[in-house]
Image (cartoon, helix red, strand yellow):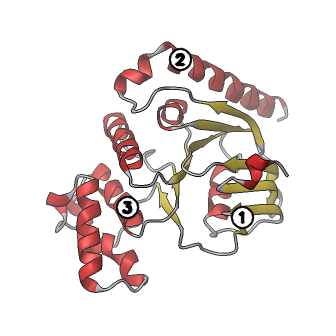
Amino acid sequence: MTTAVQTAKIAAHGVEKEFPGNKVLEDFDLQIKGGEFLSLLGPSGCGKSTFLNILAGLETYDGGDVLVDGKHVEGVNKDVGVVFQSYALFPWLTAQKNVEAGLKIRGVPRKERRDRAAEVLRTVGLQTAANRLPHQLSGGMRQRVAIARILAYEPDVLLFDEPFAALDAQTREFLQGELLRIWENGTTKKTVLFVTHSIDEAIFLSDRIAVMTRAPGRVKALIDVDLPRPRTSESRNTEDFIHIRSQVARILEEEVRLGTDNH
């Protein structure tokens, strides 16, 4: 085993996953370094979200190894936080109480969880919306509450499953910038796996992009995103950004074409 694999925060080796009549992952290998922001891209149905669910302990796998900090993933890990496309907020609780919910489950005392929730709501820019119910918030605000809820209990690893896919383009770009601001300004940089269908989103956010094959999915290419941080809207117009976009698009188009040719 190489040193890079040994020091990886997240390591997947030869992962296999099959649903009845449908093999989703095959010989899936991926290593993510501590503090790295890595995006996972691939054709629809290639197993991106399945791997995220395996890593979160929400889904089992049939072969290979998945490790976090060198320990096998077995069930839900309190050091791993997940944000899904659906906000999954409790509709009867205010933004503040939604953020407190995870802390309450973990047995954090009332005052401490109230103070911590207020702090992370300030971090995501929602301190003035603390007492609003989810139906009183916009889609972008609800997603920020979902992110705040995960940040509140300070997991080492953050998993995002297309969290901004349902939002309009303007809100989506705003929240991409907010996510980077929170990630870059944290006392310790979290390790992030971000599943997306958007090439531009992956480039803007990531240190590296893992591009998957069509199903059964495996990692076809790992692409370094050598763009300066902090990133701004101007980053999207640079020659380097456009070059990476072309490189990733070419790999994805090849996989989609191979999938079409085989049907």
In the image, taking residue 167 as reference, residue 263 lies left or right, namely: right
Q: Which mark is residue 240?
A: 2
Residue 154: horizontal and vertical position, in percent?
43, 66
Q: Nearer the viewer, residue 77 or 195?
A: 77
Q: Which mark is residue 17?
A: none
Instruction: Name the image quarter holding the C terminus.
Output: top right
Residue sticking out furthest to the top: 239
Which residue in the protein does label 1 denote? 70
What residue sits 29% from the left and 77% below the top? 113
Q: Earlier in the sequence, mark 2 or mark 3?
A: 3
Q: Amino acid at mark 2?
A: Asp
Q: Which mark is residue 146?
A: 3
Residue 253 in view in this figure: yes
Residue 211: horizontal and vertical position, in percent?
68, 36
In the image, taking residue 122 as reference, residue 230 lies left or right, namely: right
Q: Amino acid at mark 1?
A: Gly
What residue sits 50% from the left and 62% below the top? 82
Label 2, secondary structure: give it: helix
State whether residue 42 is above or below residue 133.
Answer: above
Q: Residues within 10 Å of mark 3 (few under 14, many from 20)?
A: many
In the image, taking residue 199 as reference, residue 110 lies left or right, namely: left
Q: Amino acid at mark 3?
A: Ala
Residue 135: horizontal and vertical position, in percent?
24, 63
Instruction: Look at the numbered discs 1 and 2 and tell me whether their residues touch, using CB distance below 8 Å.
Output: no
Q: Earlier in the sequence, mark 3 or mark 1?
A: 1
Q: Residues within 10 Å of mark 2 (few under 14, many from 20)?
A: some
Which mark's residue is nearer the viewer, 3 or 1? 1
In the picture, residue 52 is in which quadrant? Answer: bottom right
Instruction: Look at the numbered discs 3 and 1 and tell me whether their residues touch, using CB distance below 8 Å.
Output: no
User: Residues under labels 2 and 3: Cα distance?
Assistant: 32 Å
Residue 57: horizontal and vertical position, in percent?
64, 69
